């Protein structure tokens, strides 16, 4: 029996969270679209299967189903929300349509603490995040109710003999405070998975895989961006093949204060990793002269990056057969969508999403990992905390935080304000809860007074958000004294700004970056 779980995705916004929670229990799992064939599923030999939630109703035409044979595999199956309903329907129960799918807090009474509820006490009440959608009018044969809400809505059912479990609530979300107990009961006790998925174990396995892929002579080229993903990928590959790895760091002139020096000191001086820094600020700024359109800026930067990287690679004495890329698991999960394609909002540029014409094989050692795992891996590999807990920084850098033309002066202005925002917020004890915090240069000039002088200068917007994955975000109600300090310091210390405003837009409708 394998030691890993399979999550079949029916399109829920929470599917990735299920996987992250299972991994936190140190059990490896993967997310596959629910449309995968039984042959593939059975060949993968999961120790158990989780059927995710989803936006559709099982009573609708075209509602997705897992292959029916999974119910004969003899492995435990946990259905969550839609997963429960589709299992009920396929196994002969009856599901009736509800109105729309809604979520809400509910107290459920545990009637039988068997199966996935075994870590909870019979007779106790638990706070859970319920989804109210379709209703189970008749459970499938062999299933019994295990828990109900205070209003008598079934919250958990089980067929203990066949080891099938269904939940109408979401154990994976933070709103179900003890939800990890349920997933632990499923993963550890019922599926028999041992908690062995740790970053220490991962390093050994990944090092061996990289060595095997690259071979005893192969050389790997890696574009370091200073961000967490490319940094951790580089550190891991370096562990595997030593100085047959060369990193190229492009200073595009759009970096934050001290960023280039930091990369040099951590990787070059600290780790002794072969690192080439290319100072290409002039090239990027020349290309950006007169460009104000956000998409155009992104294109110019993307192209310049490829050119500079390509030239740097060609100037190296050795031939490189492999290109490292910091691809993460969320980038490779095959998504199922029952809502049609989404529009491109911004064309992202990532270091790593590199020269298509450079025909090199890819080394992607982080392909199996979520961001929080990459951070743990970074620490395991000895990278400093400040590097591992860096905020995300967009590939086009400060250029997308300068509304209007990007030039040396506007870069210097936003860079100085950004350094103050970071310094002040880094000193705030709760800064780890934040996703990003930065300054934006607005080309809006307004009148002010400093000393006895009239001023007529630009505006600095401060943006601070929380987010789980960058897809949605909330603005943060920072302590007012902290905001006050940031504002005073920017105006006193950065010549060129005479007004500071705070961005109180969430995403959606705003995006995190301004361009
Ligand atoms: P938006 O602005 O689209 O940003 O809400 C979502 C997240 O993505 C980051 N971002 C980028 N990251 N290359 C990147 O690697 C890019 O071109 C890029 N643009 C935005 C942004 O900082 C936020 O975390």
Image (cartoon, rainbow, N blue to C red):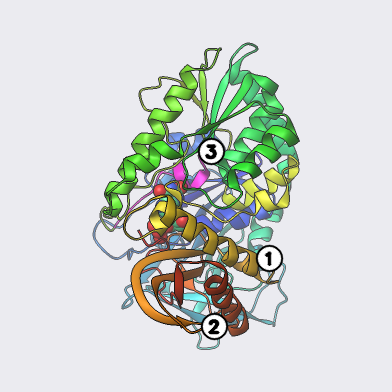
Q: Residues within 10 Å of mark 3 (few under 14, many from 20)?
A: many
Can you see residue 11? Answer: no
Q: Residue furthest bottom?
A: 151
How far apart marks 2 and 3 lie (CA) works out to 40 Å
Q: Main secondary structure of the magenta part?
A: loop
- Of the pair 9 and 447, the residue shown nearer to us: 447
Q: Quadrant of residue 127?
A: bottom right
N-terminal of the two: label 1 or label 3?
A: 1
The residue tagged 1 is 181
Residue at the image position 64 percent from the left and 73 percent from the top: 177
As helix, strand or loop, the secondary structure at mark 3 comes to loop
The answer to whether residue 228 is above or below residue 54 is above
Q: Residues within 10 Å of mark 1 (few under 14, many from 20)?
A: some
The answer to whether residue 401 is above or below residue 217 is below
Q: Which mark is residue 106?
A: 2
Number of labelled discs? 3
The residue tagged 3 is 326
């Amino acid at each position: 029996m394998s030691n890993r779980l399979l999550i079949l995705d029916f399109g829920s916004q929470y599917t990735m969270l299920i996987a992250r929670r299972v991994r936190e229990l140190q059990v490896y799992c993967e997310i596959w679209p629910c449309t995968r064939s039984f042959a593939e599923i059975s060949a993968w030999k999961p120790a158990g299967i989780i059927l995710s939630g989803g936006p559709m109703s099982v009573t609708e035409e075209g509602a997705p189903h897992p292959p029916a044979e999974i119910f004969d595999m003899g492995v435990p199956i946990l259905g969550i929300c839609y997963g429960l309903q589709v299992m009920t329907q396929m196994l002969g129960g009856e599901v009736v349509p509800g109105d729309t799918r809604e979520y809400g807090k509910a107290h459920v009474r545990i009637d039988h603490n068997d199966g996935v509820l075994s870590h909870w006490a019979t007779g106790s009440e638990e706070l859970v995040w319920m989804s109210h959608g379709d209703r189970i009018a008749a459970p499938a044969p062999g299933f019994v109710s295990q828990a109900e809400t205070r209003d008598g809505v079934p919250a958990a059912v089980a067929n203990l003999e066949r080891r099938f479990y269904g939940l109408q609530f979401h154990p994976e979300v933070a709103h179900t405070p003890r939800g990890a107990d349920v997933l632990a009961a499923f993963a550890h006790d019922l599926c028999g998975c041992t908690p062995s998925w740790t970053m220490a174990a991962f390093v050994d396995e990944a090092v061996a895989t990289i060595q095997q892929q690259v071979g005893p002579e192969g050389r790997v080229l890696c574009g370091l961006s200073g961000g967490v993903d490319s940094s951790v990928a580089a550190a891991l590959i370096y562990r595997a093949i030593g100085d047959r790895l060369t990193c190229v760091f492009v200073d595009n002139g759009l970096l934050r204060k001290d960023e280039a020096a930091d990369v040099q000191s951590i990787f070059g001086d600290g780790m002794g990793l072969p690192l080439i820094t290319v100072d290409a600020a002039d090239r990027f700024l020349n290309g950006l002269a007169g460009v104000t359109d956000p998409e155009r800026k992104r294109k110019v930067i993307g192209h310049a990056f490829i050119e500079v990287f390509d030239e740097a690679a060609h100037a190296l004495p050795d031939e490189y057969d492999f290109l490292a890329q910091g691809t993460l698991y969320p980038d490779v999960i095959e998504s199922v969508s029952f809502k049609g394609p989404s529009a491109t909002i911004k064309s992202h540029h990532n270091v790593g999403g590199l020269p298509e014409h450079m025909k090199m094989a890819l080394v992607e050692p982080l392909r199996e990992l979520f961001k929080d795992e990459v951070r743990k891996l970074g620490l395991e590999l000895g990278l400093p905390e400040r590097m591992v807990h860096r905020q995300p920084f967009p590939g086009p850098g400060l250029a997308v935080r300068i509304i209007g033309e990007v030039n040396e002066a506007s870069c210097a202005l936003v860079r100085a304000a950004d350094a103050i925002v970071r310094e002040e917020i880094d000193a705030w004890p709760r800064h780890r809860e934040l996703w990003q915090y930065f300054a934006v240069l607005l080309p809006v000039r307004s009148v002010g007074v400093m000393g006895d002088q009239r001023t007529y200068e630009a505006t600095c917007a401060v943006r601070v958000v929380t987010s789980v994955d960058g897809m949605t975000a909330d603005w943060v109600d920072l302590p007012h004294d902290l905001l006050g300090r940031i504002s005073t310091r920017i105006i006193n210390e950065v010549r060129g700004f005479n007004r500071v405003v705070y961005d109180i837009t969430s995403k959606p409708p705003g995006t995190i970056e301004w361009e």
